[in-house]
Amino acid sequence: MENPSSALSRNQFQRKKAMKKTNDRISQLPDAVLHYILSLMPMKFIVRTSILSRRWRNLWKDIWAYSTALDFGAEFATGQTPEEFVSTVNWYLQLHQAKEIEMFRLSLIPCNLSYAEKWVKFAGAKGTKEVDIHFCQNTYDDEIDFVPRKLPRKLLNSIFSKFINSIFSCDSITQLNLSCCYLHRRLNFKGYPYLKMLHLSMVRITNGLFESMLSNCPLLEELILRECYCLTRVKVSAPNLALKSLKVVDCWDASEIEIFAPNLLSFHYYGSLISMYFKNISSLVDVLLNGMFWEGYVSEYDWITILHHLGHVKILTLCYVSLEVFCIAEESASANLPVTFHNLQELQLLLEWV
């Protein structure tokens, strides 16, 4: 007769064995469902699923091979040496088989540039729409400051120029985000025929190249300039400019802004109070002016004149400095007061620097 305790142990073992077979219900789902689940995850975590079991070993490769979003951004690069990052990106691109790419994001350091040029060309050849390039090290010097310097400076500048020109040659781009890089006058920019959104953050760019970019992007609708250096004049004026939204944030080298944009709906400005010239802005609806005084700032009368040009807007946001300007202007016999806003529906006042 079987020992009751032995029979109980055998039953428990069988139940545990049965649970192991049925407990992993996710792995029993069809490939199409698992592919959809994986497609919602960052690539870095998708790859890790390959160690779960044989069932999962190659599932991620199918996802990646036909992915239309290639994200090699900061999260992807975290924890990898530059050599490992290059090797991993090269391997992933070899696996990629999709004919088109919607989004290409890249976070890199200067020593990756010679490879990055090939990566961008790869994305451009597949008609990428959105390009997001972020440099992990600042390159603000007139002659790009690469640290560590493993190559002569002239050669590094040449490699950098080729890389940026590879971005400029992607004429399928509709959205471009560039941060922490240097765009100089020697670059060969022929234009983006389909570009609708341009975001430049911590970018050193010359007045001439900036104006060339605007005049050669006929469909541009949204422009954001954040902490751009060497740009002393923000001239937003080009024939048939389609621009609808303009935001200028902390561009401290700029001494004036000139806007000739008949389709512009929104203009937001953060920075020192500088000269602003407006022409043909009849469509402008929403304006935010958040400024601060610098020593040697232009007279308060100029600021009042700026507000007169905005008398037709519907939404107006002003900083507390505007109150100081009005107080000073009231004491001036030449001040052109009052300022009348005929269509104003919403007025906001910022009481501190944002």
Image (tube, rainbow, N blue to C red):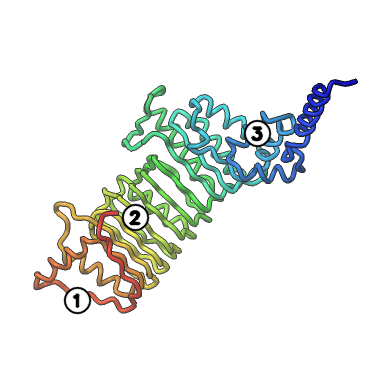
Viewer-nearest of labels 2 and 3? 3
Residue 160 horizontal/vertical position (percent): 43, 34
Amino acid on which disc 3 is placed:
Thr
Going from N to C along the chain, the mark reached first, 2 or 3, is: 3
| Residue drawn at the location 36% of the way across and 62% of the way down | 267
- Residue 67: which quarter of the image? top right
Mark 2 to mark 3 CA distance (whole Å): 43 Å
Q: Which one is in front, 7 or 350?
A: 7
The C terminus sits in image quarter: bottom left
Residue in the picture at 23% in, 57% down: 274
Regarding mark 3 in the picture, which secondary structure is present there? helix
- Mark 1 belongs to which amino acid? Pro
Q: Is disc 1 in contact with disc 2, using a CB cutoff of under 8 Å?
A: no
Q: Rate crowding at label 3 as few (under 14), some (14 to 19) or many (20 or more) other CA atoms within 10 Å.
A: some
Using the image, determine if residue 287 lies above or below residue 181. below
10 Å crowding of disc 2: few (<14), some (14-19), many (20+):
many
SS at badge 1: loop
Compared to 145, does 100 lie above or below? below
Q: CA distance from mark 1 to mark 2?
A: 27 Å
First along the sequence among labels 1 and 3: 3
- Say which residue label 3 marks: 49
Percent from the top left, x then y, of residue 58?
71, 33
The residue mark sitting in front, 1 or 3, is 3
Relative depth, front residue between 256 and 12:
12
Q: How many marks?
A: 3
Residue with the mark numbered 2: 248
User: Could you give the CA–CA distance between mark 1 and mark 3, rounded to whole angstroms?
Assistant: 67 Å
The residue lying at 38 percent from left, 24 percent from top is 149
